[in-house]
Amino acid sequence: MDEVTKVACKREMLLALKTACGSCVMCELGLKKASRDGKEMNPHVFSSMNYSRIIVVGQNPGWNEVLVGSPFVGEAGKTFDCEIAKHGLSRQDFYICNAVRCFTQYNTRPSPSHLDRCEPFLHMEINLIKPLLVVVLGAVAFERFCPTSVFSESLKKIVISPKYKVPVFAIYHPSALNLEDSARRVAFEDQIRIMCALVKALRQKY
Ligand code: SF4
């Protein structure tokens, strides 16, 4: 099978996973509509569906994401887009998803149980895409890949996930709360600079 056909097959399989995710009730987050200001939406947001062998993994979708049906389109996503644009990249260079695929009311942190229940989606994506690099945003996503490592000690370098056997590059989650401290903001920009250099070096392979 040639490369183009292989990628087309993988896209089809990702579409099937997206459909399965759209009606998943493996935890209670999938049972409740996402709601705000009297508006109700499907709580599931699977992925950006943009095929790339560089995967970005965040935490879970917020209200902006359920409105659009795509991950990382709110303020944090815009910060990410803006920073990678400075290095000549765009979100089209990445396959973007979250460790947990459903909205949590008030954007609360998903519980370990939510993360465990939702992990089969991540597992299947990793097996299908065979990423050249996984960029994890924040400690919650990092813990899924490297459960025995310390997030703060694993920044600015590639670590191999003992669980998934893939290279992982961890950066701060670009939420406003995370980056309001100016030193953290500078550190985040440096993490993005290194990550973009890595992605450009890998670009010819995907
Ligand atoms: S959070 Fe994940 S496991 Fe829970 S219902 Fe949503 S898709 Fe299913």
Image (cartoon, rainbow, N blue to C red):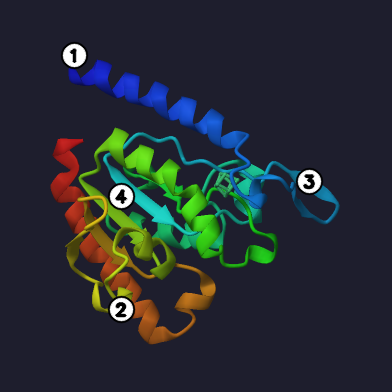
Q: Amino acid at mark 3?
A: Glu
Q: Earlier in the sequence, mark 3 or mark 2?
A: 3
Q: Which residue is found at the position 38% from the left and 25% from the top? A: 11
Tell me the tag on residue 180. none
**Residue indicated by mark 4:** 89
Q: Position of residue 161 (x, y in %)?
A: 23, 57
Residue 105 drawn at (x, y percent): 70, 61
N-terminal-most mark, 1 or 3: 1
The answer to whether residue 131 is above or below residue 188 is above
Question: Is residue 83 at least partly visible in the picture?
Answer: no
Crowding at label 4, few (<14), some or many (≥20) Cα neighbours within 10 Å?
Answer: some
Q: Quadrant of residue 152?
A: bottom left
Viewer-nearest of labels 3 and 4? Answer: 3
**Callout 1 secondary element:** loop
- Marks 4 and 2 sit apart, C-alpha to C-alpha, by 25 Å
Ligand 1 within 8 angstroms of badge 1 C-beta: no
- Residue 118 visible here: yes
Q: In terms of depth relative to the viewer, which is nearer, 20 or 77?
A: 20
Q: Which numbered disc covers residue 40? A: 3
Are discs 1 and 2 less than 8 Å apart at CB?
Answer: no
User: Mark 2 and mark 4 in contact (Cβ < 8 Å)?
Assistant: no
Residue type highlighted by circle 2: Ser
**Residue under numbered circle 1:** 1
- The residue located at (42%, 29%) in the rendering is 14
Q: Earlier in the sequence, mark 3 or mark 4?
A: 3
Q: Number of numbered discs present?
A: 4
Marks 1 and 3, how far apart at CA = 44 Å
